[in-house]
Amino acid sequence: MSEPVAFSAATNTKIAELLGRYPRKQGALIPTLYLAQDEFGWLKPEVMQLVADKLELPLASVLATAMFYTMLYKKPVGRFHVQICTNVSCYLLGSDELMAIAQQALGLAPGESTPDGLFTLEAVQCLCACDRAPTLQINKDDYFKVTPAKFKELLAQLKTDGVKLGPPVGWLADQHHAHA
Amino acid sequence: MSTKPTAYTPHPMEKRVLLRDHLGVDFTQLENYLSHGGFKMWQKAMELGRDGVLAEVKASGLRGRGGAGFPTGMKWSFLPKDERPRYLVVNADEGEPGTFKDRYFLELDPFRQLEGILIAAYTINAHVSYIYIRGEYWKSKAVTEDAIAQLYKAGWLGKNIQGSGFDLDVYMQTGAGAYICGEETALIESIEGKPGMPRLKPPFPANIGVFGMPTIVNNTETLAAVPVILEMGGETWANLGTPKNGGTKLVGVAGHVKTPGLFEVPMGASMRDVIFNLGGGITDDREILAIIPGGSSCPFLTKDEIDVAMDFDGLKPVGSMLGTACITVMAEGLTDLLTVMQRVTAFYQHESCGQCTPCRQGTGWLKAIADKMDEGLGEDEHIDLLISACNQIEGNTICAHGEAAAWPIRSIAKKFRPQLEAAIRQRATAHGYVAKPLAAHPAA
Ligand SMILES: Cc1cc2nc3c(=O)[nH]c(=O)nc-3n(C[C@H](O)[C@H](O)[C@H](O)COP(=O)(O)O)c2cc1C
Ligand code: SF4
Ligand code: FES
């Protein structure tokens, strides 16, 4: 059995404010899923149910929307979500080399996470900063005109930081849960 | 003693009325926006009245900057004359590969678009506006949210704005990683909390849009132009450009050029001059291999097809379109066109919402063929298969994602056949298929 989940008071206040923005409750769904993800790390089944209850929506509607959008996470994501743009302009200016560096340094293929929960690697579509290619995003931070040398340094730094910060809350339990 | 420059000097072919030359002024702060003349056009809009503003926008010839170039004034006047609430939806879902223009306003000059939103909402009599910002644009989202908060605090949003009697609430909404939500009806579905699946048109959003109500969807750059149009007058704006293509246009140059960046030129500027004067010419002074004129949905151009006017009509002679006017340059010797094709096919396959068979299956076929070629299993006939698949997608889908996927690939297959044939042979060799005959044609 999974443990019961509940929103914090702060999140409940934000959801109440969001609901005021739309004539229908479902309008608040995507912003609420983002809040839920911020609070619980990813959208595990009981979190989806919590959102459905909160917005008085059928669970199926919540699932359909959550499944459609790649930035709504249906599985746990590591402490550092390394997202490398592999679209045309970045390819032209060396994104394949950056991807190879990340794969080598992290021991991951795109789409995978390290077992310790520190890194998730992903190939992403055009981040729309092509004039500053090659680009990548780590969590919410942009990195532009990334050189191989700078990227290697950055990854080394994140590995050091990761040891201090540890995996996201509940990583081990969620890993188990995700594969159950 | 040297002094710090306070202004950027644009190239003489630029005409900057939207982009700022000031250095060191933080336009994300309302006080700075106001002290540089911001929100003066709100006053003018009040004086002109709704019909007056609409007349100026129509006279300006402004055409939508989201890519399709639909006349903005005409769009606004399509709203039905009934009592239903109206919405203004701002398309800031910038995601077209190769594009980086709306980001400028969203990160550095957010009040320009917000002043446009106020004026547009007043003109169409909408009291709620949603700004839909691409999920990955974290900085844009933070800046916009903060800008909206500053406006509420200063009485520029909410009830009875600046004593005008007009009410407007603006809410930021965020995407979540689906390119297709840039398509206006998918965007509307997404604001409603649903999967971003485009709707069949008609009905058009002007009649049945978000939450079933009349809705105007405009791009960020379109709305940012509105205050500038009121300031200089519609006719003056129109005269900056070419007939039927009023004003200036943000243009980007990226890829294999010496000085990539975002610039602003009069509509109708020569693409060659944009690439060579603003983009600084090709890396290592190489030859151009191929050009994407305005995002990867546009048919590719050869090096002999760049003497065209950058406006919504100027690229028709070369079978392409202006799109978002952000150019991607690919240099001879630095570009593997098959890899480019693979990236493009993978993108449209991944981003298809999946509700129409020709788009869902067709984009899968395009990707599968490109991948097969890359694995060394390509044959020359596969190039014809690509063209055939594109022909079967085009015109058979609910939204223009189908065309967006088909057009660039068909242009590569038709215009760059020798390069593709060479790439097919190079890959076969690289994968050790040299001595063997190439693999059989995949079962249809
Ligand atoms: C697949 C697809 C993606 C689109 N993406 C965008 C986009 O990211 N931003 C945008 O403004 N318009 C985009 N559009 C165009 C919109 O549907 C719509 O025409 C535009 O937002 C209208 O605004 P405008 O009249 O100011 O140009 C897209 C269209 C299609 C078919
Ligand atoms: S054309 Fe493609 S993206 Fe557009 S509605 Fe059909 S399946 Fe969806
Ligand atoms: S292709 Fe990477 S940012 Fe556009």
Image (spheres, rainbow, N blue to C red):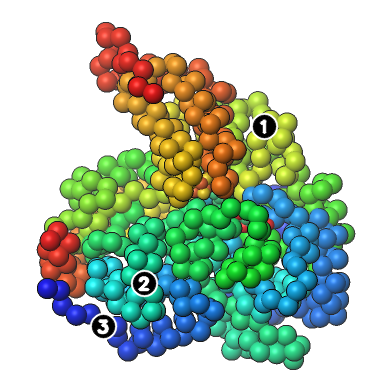
Is residue B345 shown to the viewer in this render?
no
* SS assignment at label 3: loop
Q: Nearer the viewer, residue B97 or B198?
A: B198
Q: Which of the two discs, 3 and 2, labels the residue nearer the N terminus?
A: 3
**B252 in relation to A37, above or below:** above
Q: Are marks 3 and 2 in contact (CB under 8 Å)?
A: no
* Left or right of B365, for residue B266: right
Residue A176 location, quadrant: bottom left
Q: Do callouts 3 and 2 point to residues on the same chain?
A: yes
The quadrant of the picture occupied by the N terminus of chain B is: bottom right
Residue that appears at 31% across and 26% down: B375
Read off the residue under disc 3: A6
**A116 in relation to A41, above or below:** above
- The percent coordinates of residue B160 (x first, y second) are 70, 90
Q: Residues within 10 Å of mark 3 (few under 14, many from 20)?
A: some
Q: Nearer the viewer, residue A178 or A10?
A: A178
Query: Chain letter of disc 2?
Result: A
- The percent coordinates of residue B248 (x first, y second) are 74, 54
- The percent coordinates of residue A104 (x first, y second) are 20, 45
- Marks 1/2: CA distance? 48 Å
Q: Nearer the viewer, residue A117 or B254?
A: A117
* Left or right of A20, for residue A41: left
Read off the residue under disc 1: B319
Read off the residue under disc 2: A58
* Left or right of B105, for residue B240: right
Q: Residues within 10 Å of mark 2 (few under 14, many from 20)?
A: few
- Marks 1/3: CA distance? 56 Å
Query: Chain letter of disc 3?
Result: A
Judged by depth in the image, the label closer to the viewer, 1 or 3, is 3
Is residue B298 shown to the viewer in this render?
yes
* Left or right of A176, for residue B308: right
Residue that appears at 41% across and 84% down: A14
